[in-house]
Image (tube, rainbow, N blue to C red):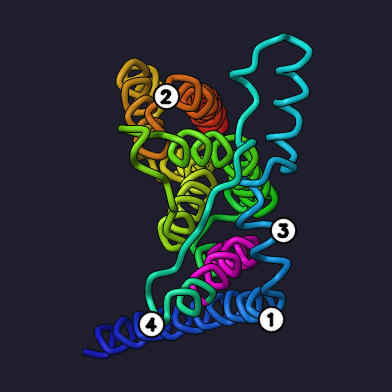
Amino acid sequence: MKDTANSEMSFLAHLEELRWHLVRAFASVFVFAVLAFVFKSFVFDTIILAPSDPTFFTNYQLCNLAGLLDMPVLCINQNSISFQNINMSGQFTTHIWVSFVIGIIAAFPYIFWEFWQFIRPALYPEEVKHSRGAIFFASTLFTTGVLFAYYIICPLSVHFLGNYQVSDKVENIVNLGSYISTITSIVLAGGVIFELPILIYFLAKIGLVSSRFLMKYRRHSIVIALLLAAVITPPDIVSQVLVCVPLIILYEAGIIIARRIESSRK
């Protein structure tokens, strides 16, 4: 009975520790979300609505490239998109949601650090030694995914979806909530997808996947990458290739990571 009680207390202590890690992580999201809420003009005019503007970095550079190569099709988002709000509280709820998403993105390194602090005591000293830099690499991959989605996928998606017409008689007047939902989902998806090597690292560490398993299902991974690219991008081949290629590269990097873990065990 004594051992059972001690085990139960140990389990409850772990739950209590996890609770405080989650509280601190949420507090960091809240702080950044409040900052994003306060600086409303910068967040919306400079960040959120920017991919639809002709002066946006990607749009501007592609138009310059279109002039050099004499390929007008590369010049995107040159026609301004009209946004509308049809709900009484639409702009306010959108403001809150965008602030929350930016809070998650900005606080991600700290969130991952809290997660790492929780699982670190369960690792052996040798595993902790080989896991140095995990927070740096996870944060770098997440940031890279967010920037890739924001500067590459978002402008292409806005151009394709915002200018697509079934008939010349139908005018596109984009709902603000729909636009925000598209941008935030693409950006968050990009950040999460780029965490694939980190996911493979932890799965290989606990023995759930191996380099042989990953190589065996390499062809299946390409199909899954194409499906993911089709989900998070507009239905045009250029956007899907731009998303699919990094996914395949990340998967191959995961195979190398799993192989190195197996070598270290031997």
The quadrant the N terminus occupies is bottom left
Q: Residue at x 37, y 28 (%)?
A: 235
Q: Disc 1 on helix, strand or loop?
A: helix
- Give the Cα separation between the discs numbered 3 and 4: 49 Å
Crowding around mark 3 (Cα neighbors within 10 Å: few <14, some 14 to 19, many 20+) is few
Three-letter code for the amino acid on which mark 1 is drawn: Val
- Give the Cα separation between the discs numbered 2 and 1: 37 Å
Q: Disc 3 on helix, strand or loop?
A: helix
Mark 3 or mark 2, which has the lower sequence index?
3
For the residue pair 195 and 96, the one nearer the viewer reads as: 96
Discs 3/4, front: 3
Residue contact between numbered discs 3 and 2, judged by CB atoms under 8 Å? no
Left or right, 245 with respect to 142, comes to: left
User: Any magenta on residue 116?
Assistant: yes
Three-letter code for the amino acid on which mark 2 is drawn: Asp
* Magenta segment main secondary structure: helix
Q: Quadrant of residue 110?
A: bottom right
Discs 4/1, front: 1
Q: Residue at x 57, y 72 (%)?
A: 99
- For residue 112, above or below residue 86: above
Q: Which of the numbered marks, if any, corresponds to residue 236?
A: 2
Highlighted magenta segment, given as a residue range: 96-117
| Residue 252 seen anywhere in this rendered image of the structure | no
Three-letter code for the amino acid on which mark 3 is drawn: Thr
Mark 4 or mark 1, which has the lower sequence index?
4
Mark 4 or mark 2, which has the lower sequence index?
4
- Give the Cα separation between the discs numbered 3 and 2: 27 Å
Q: Which of the numbered marks, if any, corresponds to residue 46?
A: 3
Crowding around mark 4 (Cα neighbors within 10 Å: few <14, some 14 to 19, many 20+) is few
Crowding around mark 1 (Cα neighbors within 10 Å: few <14, some 14 to 19, many 20+) is few
Q: Which of the numbered marks, if any, corresponds to residue 10?
A: 4
Mark 3 or mark 4, which has the lower sequence index?
4
